[in-house]
Amino acid sequence: MLLKFCGAAGEVTGSCHLVRFSDVTVLLDCGIFQGGEERHIRNREPFPFDPQTVKAVLLSHAHLDHCGRLPLLVKAGFKGKIFATQATCDLAKIVLLDAAKLQEEDAAWKIKRLKKKGEDWSWVSPLFTTSDAERVFEHFEPVPYGEWVDLSPTVRFRLRDAGHLLGSGMVELRWQSNGKERTLLFTGDLGQSGMPILRDPEKVEQAELLLMESTYGNREHETTFNECVEQLRQIITETVSKGGRVLIPSFAVGRTQELLYTLNDLVESGQLPIVPVFVDSPMAREVLKVYQRHRELYDEEASRKLRSGDEPFTFPGLTIVATVEESKTLNELREPCIIIAGSGMCTGGRIKHHLYHGIGNPNNAIVFVGFQAKGTLGRQLVEGISPVRIFGEMHEVKARVFLLDGFSAHADRRYLLQWASSFAALPTQTFLVHGEQEAANSLAEALRGMGWNATVPRLGQEFAME
C-alpha cells in the first residue's frame, strides 16, 4: 500500500490523499485550495497522479475544500465512482453548481475589465464550468453509513458518522496483505460533541493507519456552544438597541442551518425580540431542502423537536432572500436587522456587498461563526486588521468584530484528543492533515506525549506499508 498526500498537508484546504493498493487505486477527497493569491495557480496545476488510474473517490463530505476539484478530476480523465452518503451527494451537487456559477461570473467580470483596459483577455477562463460540474454527478454512488463496499477482491471500505456536516463520514478502508487484514481510517473533518442537529462523531477503537484532521489542533474553542449562543443573543440585543445591523458571514452548507436552528430557539423562547432576519443565500435555501429531506440523520434533540411539531429552521421575522435585486435592497434598509450571507470566510459571495456598505458603521456588528483560513478577508477582520480591501477599495473597520468559535463544526484540540483516546490500541502511524503547520505540529506533539507515533506530512510526501 502506498499513501500520497496531495493536499491539505501543512494547510487546511485542498483535502486530497491518494491510496494505491496492489489491485486498486482510490482517492480520499478531492478538494479545492482556498485562501491566498496563489490558490488560482495551485487549483489549475495538474494532479500529481494520473486520474485515469483512480478507480474510486471516497468523499468524506460536501464542503468545497473536500469536493471542489472533482470537476477537474473528471475533466482529466477520471472514469470511476465517487462514493459518499446520499446526503453528501445531494449537498455536493449544490456546492459544485454554485462554485461553477461563481467561476463563470468571475471570469466574465475579468474579461470585461481587461477588454475595457484594452489588454489581452484570451487567457481568462473559469476553473470549471456548470457543464463540468454536472458531469461529476454521473459518477456519484450513494452508500449508507456502516455498509461495507468492495472496491476489489482485497480492498473494501465503509463510512462512519463524522458529526461534522449532514452526511459527513469518516472513511474506514480495509485491505488484505500477507494474509492479514489492515485498516486505514481517514477522519475527514470531525465535528464537535453536543452540537445541534447532528449526532456526535462515532468513536473508533482500531486502525493501524490514521489520517486525522488538525484544524484546531493547537487551540481550544474559547467558549462552548451554549456560551456562544448567549454571546450571540447579547450581541444581537445590543446591536438592535443601537439601531445597527448584525452581519454574519456564514457557510451556506451546515453553518447557516445551525444558526437558523439556534435563532429558532432564541426567538420562540422569547430570549430575543422578533427582529428581521435575512438569509441572503439562494444556495442556503437549497441546502435547507436537503436538511429537511434527510431528517433520519438528526440527533435525538432535533428529532424530538420534529416529533413535537416544531419546524426547527423557521421562526417569525425570517426571510429567505432569493434574487440579486432583493439582496441589494437590504443595504437600503434603515431598520435594525440580521443578515446571514456567504461566503463564510468573506472570499466572495453576497456578504462582501453587505460588508462594503456596513463595515464603516460603528453601530453594526460583524459576527464570525467559523474558522478563517490564512489569506482570507475574514482572517484579516478577525485579526483586527484595518483598513481592509473590499472590491478594490480600502475600508476602515469601524463595525465591532466578534469571533464565536464555539459554533465551529470542527472539533477543537481538547475534543480531538478525547476522541483519539477512544482507540483500544494505538494506531501504528498517525498522519495529521487538514491543519495549518503550527496547529498540526502542536497536536502531533500532544499525541506523542500520549505514546502515539504522530507525523505531519509534507505536500507530495509518500508513505509505503507492506
Image (cartoon, helix red, strand yellow):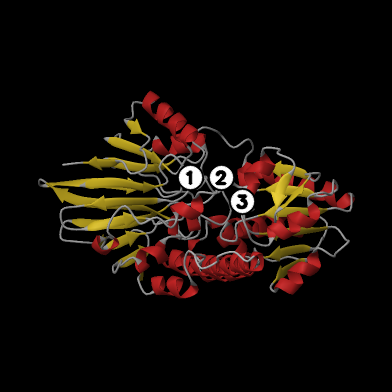
Q: Amino acid at mark 3?
A: Met
Q: Residue 345: which disc? A: 3
Q: Name the one closer to the observer, 13 or 375.
A: 375
What residue is pinned by disc 1?
12
Which residue reaches farthest front?
118
State the CA–CA distance, disc 3 to disc 1: 13 Å
- Position of residue 256 relative to residue 232, above or below, is below
Q: Amino acid at mark 1?
A: Val
Q: Residue 447: which disc? A: none
What residue is pinned by disc 2?
373
Q: Are marks 1 and 2 in contact (CB under 8 Å)?
A: yes
Residue under the image location 29 percent in, 61 percent down: 51
> Which of disc 1 and disc 3 is earlier in sequence?
1
Disc 1 crowd, CA 10 A, few/some/many (<14, 14-19, 20+) = many
Q: Are marks 3 and 1 in contact (CB under 8 Å)?
A: no
| Residue 463 shows in the view | yes
The secondary structure type at the circle numbered 2 is: loop
State the CA–CA distance, disc 1 to disc 2: 7 Å
Q: Amino acid at mark 2?
A: Ala
Q: Is residue 463 left or right of residue 38?
A: left
